[in-house]
Amino acid sequence: MERIQNGGPRANGFSSRKMLKGIDQLAWQRISYKALFALLFATPALVQYGLGLPFWCYPIAFAILFLPVFGIFMMAFNRMCVAEYGVQSTNVSRFIDFSDPTLASKYANKKIPMEVLYEAYADGKLDFKCDVLEALENRHLFSTFELTFDHIRFLIYNFIPELIFHSKIQDAEQVCDHYDRGNDFYEAFLGPMMIYTSGICRNESETLEEMQSNKLKMVGEKCQMREGDRHLDIGCGWGTLVNYAAENHGTHSTGVTLAKRQIEWGQGVAEKKQVGSRIKFLCMDYRDIPNTKYDKITCLEMAEHVGVKNFQSFLAQVRDMLEDDGIFFLQIAGLRRTWQWEDFIWGLFMAKYIFPGADASCPLGWIVTELERAGFEIHSSETIGVHYSLTINRWYDNWMKPANQAAMTEKYGRIVRIWNIFLAWSTIIARQGNSTCTQLVCHKNLNVYDRLKLFKVKSN
C-alpha cells in the first residue's frame, strides 16, 4: 500500500487511480417493499383474526407487531444477500490474529460479521496483522455486513427511542459525554486547529491544516462575510470558525455549543488572537438561543444531531433569526438513498459509538425538501464527500501515530480502538459514497431578496 508523507496509509485509489476495491450490494434495488408492507399490514390482521379479536384491536396489534415483523423481514433479506456473496473464506487468518480461542475456532474458515469484528477488536479479542486501514480496504475478503441481534437490540432500545424523543436532556447527555471527553483526545487526531468537520482539498499533498484553512476561506466566501456582520455559528465546536470570521472578516460572531470544554478552548484561542471583543460563546441547547437577528448563520455538521423529529422546527428557528437579506450556510453529512448493507451496518456503528442521536443524517433530497418547506431557497449545493474522505484520512494518520496511540490508550482505554475502526472505516465510506457531505448556501425565498448579489459569471 502506498504511503503519504506524514506516515499513514494512503486511501486506495486516490493517487494510483487503480480500480477501487469493494463489492456493490444494491440492497435498495433488490428489496421488495411491496412484500415488506404486505407483511407489516397483513400480519396484525391475521393475528387479530386468529385470536378472534374485535376490529378496533387492529391498531394495537399493528403497533405491537410492527418492530418484530420489520426486524425479522430485514434480517431474513440481509441473510439472503450475505449468503449470495459467500460466508466461507480462507483469508481470515491472513488479516486477523485471534487471541480469543472461541472466536478463532468459529471463524477459522468463515467470514466474521462486521459487528462481531469491531466489538472483538475493541475488547482486545483480536487484532489485525497489518495497518487497520489496510485491513479494512480488504474487508470483503474476511468479513460480512451481517445484521445481528445486537443491531436489532440497539435499534429497539436505543436508536428508535432517541429518534422519537430528542429531548434537551437527552441531547445534552449525549453531547457532553461525547465532546467533553477531553480536548486532548480530539487534538490527537484533529490537530491544533480543532475542526471536527470536513476540510477542502485542493491537491493531495496538502496538510490537514491547509485543508481546513481552505474550508474556512470557502465558508467565508460563500457566506459573503463582511466587516460588521452579525454572525451566528450553531454547533460551533471548539470555535475555530467563530474566531476565524472575527479575525479575517471583522464579524461580530456568536458560537453556540453544549460542551463546556469546547467553549474554554475557543475562548483561549480568542484571547491569543485578540478578538475577544468581537466574539461570544453561548453554552446552551440550540433551542434556547435568544431570538436575535443575524446577517449570516452557519451550521457545519451539527444539524444531523437535531434529529428528524425536530428538523423542521430547527429550520424555522434559523429562518426567524436570519435577516431577510441574510445567508444561511448549511454543511451536513448524510447517508445515500440508494443504500447498501454496508451503509446500514456502518450507520448503526456510528450511532452507537461516534455520533449518537444524529438520526437526521439523511439523503440530500430529504434535506432539500425540508429547507424548502421551511421557506428557504437553495442558491448552491456542492457535494464534498471525497474531501471528507481525505480529511478523515489525515485524522487517521494523526491518530495512529505511536505516541498518540500509547497516550490515548493509557488514559481512555477501549474507546481508542473504536476510534481506530471509525477513522479507518470512515475514510473508505466517504470515498465510496455510502455517506457523503454537502454544502448548501441558502436564503429566504422572498420576492424582495436581492439574488443578484449571489450571482457570478463563470469563466468556464
Image (cartoon, rainbow, N blue to C red):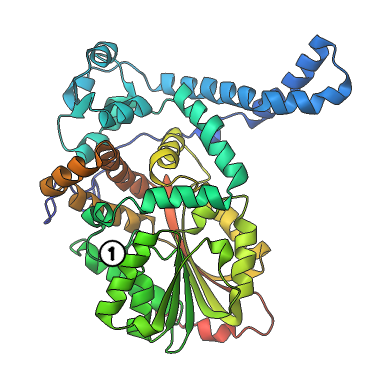
Is 153 located above or below residue 163 in the figure?
above
Q: Residue at x 31, y 31 (%)?
A: 118
Residue 376 visible:
yes
Location of residue 419 by image quarter: top left
**What residue type is disc 1 on?**
Cys
Q: Residue furthest bottom?
A: 227
| 226 with respect to 289 (left or right) | left
Quadrant of residue 442 in the image? bottom right
Question: Along the line of sight, which residue is nearer the eye, 330 or 26?
Answer: 330
Q: Count the marks: how many?
A: 1
Task: State whether residue 102 is above or below residue 178.
Answer: above
Residue 429 in percent (x, y) is at 36, 44
Residue denoted by label 1: 201
Q: Give above or below for 127 relative to 322.
A: above
Can you say which quadrant of the picture contains the N terminus? top left
Circle 1 Cα neighbour tier, 10 Å, few/some/many (<14 / 14–19 / ≥20): many
Q: Tell me where residue 97 sits by quadrant.
A: top left
Judging from the image, what secondary structure is the residue with disc 1 in?
Answer: loop
Q: Is residue 147 left or right of residue 198?
A: right
Residue shown at 49% from the left, 40% from the top: 339
Residue 270, position in %: x, y? 31, 77
Residue sitting at x 60%, y 56%:
311
Between 271 and 339, the one nearer to me in the picture = 271
Q: Position of residue 308 (x, y in %)?
A: 59, 50
Quarter of the image with the C terminus in it: bottom left
Q: Position of residue 205 (x, y in %)?
A: 17, 63
- Is residue 202 visible to us here? no
| Image position of 239 with respect to 334: above or below | below
Q: Is residue 153 left or right of residue 404?
A: right
Which residue is located at x 19 percent, y 51 percent? 397
